[in-house]
Image (cartoon, coloured by chain):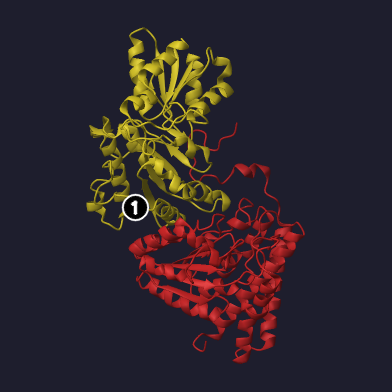
Chain colours: A yellow, B red
Amino acid sequence: MAVVREITFAQALNEALDYEMSKDPKVVVMGEDVGVYGGIYGVTAGLYDKYGPERVIDTPIAESGFVGTGVGAAATGLLRPVVELMFIDFLGVTFDQIYNQAAKMRYMFGGKAKISMVLRTVCGAGFSAAAQHSQSLHAIFAHVPGLKVVMPSTPYDAKGLLISSIEDDDPVIFIEHKALYAVKGEVPEEPYSIPLGEADVKREGKDVTIVATAAMVHKSLEVAENLEKDGISVEVVDPRTIVPLDVDTIINSIKKTGKLVVVDEGYPRCGFATDVAALAVNKAFDSLKAPVKIVTPPATPVPFSPVLESEWIPSTEKIEKAVREIL
Amino acid sequence: MEEISKEMLLWMYEMMVKIREHEERVAELFAQGKIPGFVHLYVGEEAVAVGVMANLRKEDYITSTHRGHGHYVAKGGDIKASMAELFGKKTGSGKGKGGSMHIADLDVGELGANGIVGGGIPHAVGAGLGIKLNGLDNVAVAFFGDGASNQQNFHEGINLASILKLPVVFVCENNQYQISLSYDKQQTIKSVAERGKAYGIPGVSVDGQDVLAVYEVAKEAIERARRGEGPTLIEAKTYRFRGHFEGDPQVYRSKEEVEWWKKNKDPIKLFEEKLLEKGIVTKEELDSIWEKVKKEIEEAIKFAEESPWPSKEEVLEDVFSTPTKGVLVWQW
């Protein structure tokens, strides 16, 4: 019988890693402080003791070197590396290995290479970690063809999507919002997978659609709850994966409600939110009964002071205001 | 030289000739407009790829560079597929999606040429990690140029291979110019091999125009790697006889300099003289190798010329391996 318990987002990810490592000796974990330390957010805790230093590899602070090592190991088919980039903000020092190497090898080699690799990384503001440790840069990865981009919002999704990502034969960027690690939710003890490319309607509604990602899913659900008291019915759609994108679920929801608010913690220009807005205009123009509203941070670096940072992050107030403006 | 079999010596000669002939013909085809894009040729550097590859097995891995045709040929890559790729044809190694800078033959462990300087170095480290964790006795060799030795991937890759004691050999083809900037203006050390010390691994410098010298140095490094004793950095001092790319006006070096190298340090001529002097082969045997190679190259060119172009729909193919729900390859 299936056992379902409440565990945290971090524990759910840990279970997925443990399951994949126990099942497939080709799966290795590497990155900064993933071994003895167990990962700075504890996601790899216990794996070093269980699988040893050969398969849980503590690396020097050399992101391009170890991400590239993961790419090469995957290209040979000898390993299925799960590489951890401690913060998504560090992608600047390793981006070539991701966007020019991992993403393009299969295409450039005429479909003969498989880059079975997951790059786990941490995004998100809310901890006064300032401009170089708080960004949400999923749009940059989604911009580059050849990468799958996964962004779970709940412990249940985190486990199932990480299992799918590790078993996938393409490079997957798996983005974990740091505000979610301590979030608890129901997760089956048994392994299970959630297919990439399937959005999840986190709450059904009929008046307005909110498409939200990662931590913004929870804020949007809070807003939906509040608005229900005023008789406003909000549908919250979590795409769960940015690439591939479940266009049908998003479009069907817009067709049903006729109104769209996109909430995303990425920067406002050329981002995921504007992408979804463009999609709505392109594929559901006739169904739209109001302008598409976009709620994102402003185009500034992430500020440090808690006062400034909370102004910067899309708040429930701003989300609610956006919804009310198009009712 | 005495301890190397005649068969192996002839293989080395044939491979060097094959690379030379391949590159000279590609230069002509490029000039005729039959090969599009950027082309970087390996003429003059043949002894490096061949001296190293003479020690490798099919199951060993290499990573290559933008100047990658020589590595591909010497590793045993299918030259019909690579020639067709240079033309942009459907039958190419990359189905016409990669071109000269991205030829690869994974079936023989050739993990790809690379358009980014130093980009392939960590891939060899990854191959080394895979070899080690799977308990194999294969090796991975990273080829790169002098310019790449200033890149982060060089330093990070070698350091990682050193601390994990991986079976990787790093081969710097120091052809003395990173496009236009001469070696002495890129770094103040006499040899890239000196950098081995910084990462606690052996660093050896060798005359890259002498295929037997490269062979010996590579042999030691590769055997060491197979024994599980970790990586080695080799610097092969060499020279490219042609421009950085086809069409390079070469304002940064004199014609006299280039002529001097061609006259005095042509790796094929030097090896040929040695083989004849020692009475190992006859001139006729060498001539017949040239004939055989020319025929092979012409067949590859014919194959490329007669091959079909990719169909337009193929632009959307080969982006991903695992199909999914939702939209994976976006088009508005």
User: For the point 56% across and 85% down, which residue is it?
Assistant: B6
The answer to which of B98 and A197 lies nearer the viewer is B98
Q: Residues within 10 Å of mark 1 (few under 14, many from 20)?
A: many
User: For the point 48% across and 44% down, which residue is it?
Assistant: B322
- Is residue A206 among what the camera can see? no
Q: Chain of mark 1?
A: A
- The x, y position of residue B82, in whole percent, is 63, 60
Residue B107 higher or lower than A88, as above or below? below
- Where on the picture, by quarter, is residue A137? top left
Residue A65 higher or lower than A15, as above or below? below
Q: Quadrant of the C terminus of chain B?
A: top right
B177 left or right of A316 in image:
right
User: For the point 75% across and 56% down, which residue is it?
Assistant: B33
- Where on the picture, by quarter, is residue B301? bottom right
A109 left or right of B153 in image:
right
- The x, y position of residue A183, in whole percent, is 27, 30
- Where on the picture, by quarter, is residue B9? bottom right
Toward the right, the furthest residue is B32
Residue A75 higher or lower than B274, as above or below? above
B129 left or right of A111 in image:
left
- The x, y position of residue A270, in whole percent, is 52, 31
Q: Secondary structure at mark 1?
A: strand
The answer to which of B42 and B13 lies nearer the viewer is B42
Q: Amino acid at mark 1?
A: Val
- Is residue A54 among what the camera can see? yes
Count of numbered marks: 1
- The x, y position of residue A211, in whole percent, is 44, 23
The residue that label 1 is drawn on is: A28
